[in-house]
Amino acid sequence: MSNPQFTIRTFYRFVRLENIADLRQAILTHATENKLCGTILLANEGINSTISGSAENMNRFWQQLTSYPEFTGMPYKESFSSEAPFKRMKVRLKREIVSLYQPQVDPTQVVGDYVDAQKWNELIQDPECLVIDVRNHYEVEMGTFENAQDPKTNSFKEFAQFATTQCDPQKHKKVAMFCTGGIRCEKASSYMKQLGFENVYHLNGGILKYLEDVSASESLWHGDCYVFDEREAVGHGLVPRQKK
C-alpha cells in the first residue's frame, strides 16, 4: 500500500475495571487530544477497541493508555490505510465488552488455552479436534479456516445456544475456536470451560494475527476476513480487499 496515512490499532483485554465512568472521560480526553477516531468500549470486565489516526498521535495515545496499570503491556494488532476508516471518536460504557449475555461467565478468571498463529495449523488439522468459527454467519460466508464449523449465528449471544445443543463435553474432547481479533473466541472459551469442556483452545490474536504472521503459501485460511470498518475486509498481510 502506497503512503498509508492512517494507523489502525485493534486491542482488547479482559481485566477487572472499577470507576469506569471516570476512566471513560480520561480516555476520551486522551483520544480527542490526539485526534483519533474509532470506538472504545469499556465495561467492568475490560476494554475493547479499534481506533485510527496518524502514527505519531497513535503512539502518544498508546503511551497514555498503557500508563494505567490495568492496560500495561496490552497487546495490539496494527494495520494501515490510505483512507480514514472511522469518522469520529466514541468511548462507550457497556455491560460487556463483547455481549454473550451469560452473566456467570468471567474471562478475567478462566479461559481456554491460547494458541499462537504458528501452531494453529497443526491443531485444526487434528481429526479429533472440533474447530468452531464463533463469528456471525455473514462473516463466515466471506472466509474461514479449513475444517471449521459454522454455528450459523446472527449475533454472538446466540453462541450459547449452539454450544449447549450442538457440542458435547463427552464427545468433543478437544475444541478450538477462533474469531476476528480474539475477543469473542476468548470469551467463548470461558463459557465452554464452564460447560465442562476440558481441552479448550482459542486462536491468540484471532484471524487478523494469523493473516499477519502466516504466509499465504502455508495458510489454511480461505477467503477474506470481514472487519468492522470502511475497509470491509482484509486478506493475507492485512491487505484491504478491493472494493467492488
Image (cartoon, grey):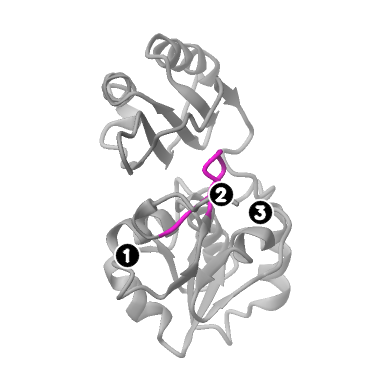
Tell which circle, 1 or 2, labels the residue nearer the N-terminal end. Answer: 1
Q: Secondary structure at mark 1?
A: helix
- Across and down, in percent, residue 237 comes to 33, 56
Q: Using the image, tell me which numbered label, if any, was put on residue 117.
A: 1
* Rendered image quadrant of residue 137: bottom right
Q: Secondary structure at mark 3?
A: helix
Q: Is residue 53 left or right of residue 28?
A: left
Instruction: Write down the residue under mark 2.
Output: 243
In magenta stretch: residue 130: no
- Residue 102 or residue 127, whichever sits in front: 127
Residue at image x 48%, y 15%?
28
Q: Is residue 72 left or right of residue 159?
A: left
At label 1, counting other C-alpha atoms closer than 10 Å, the crowd grade (few under 14, some 14-19, many 20 or more) is many
- Across and down, in percent, residue 180 comes to 49, 54
Most prominent secondary structure in the magenta stretch? loop
At label 3, counting other C-alpha atoms closer than 10 Å, the crowd grade (few under 14, some 14-19, many 20 or more) is some
In magenta stretch: residue 231: yes
Q: Amino acid at mark 2?
A: Lys
Q: Amino acid at mark 1?
A: Ala
Q: Amino acid at mark 3?
A: Phe
For the residues labelled 3 and 1, the Cα–Cα distance comes to 23 Å
Tell which circle, 3 or 2, labels the residue nearer the N-terminal end. Answer: 3
Residue at image x 53%, y 69%?
144
* Rendered image quadrant of residue 138: bottom right
Instruction: Write down the residue under mark 3.
Output: 156
For the residues labelled 3 and 2, the Cα–Cα distance comes to 26 Å
Residue at image x 58%, y 85%?
170
Magenta range:
226-235
Discs 3/1, front = 1
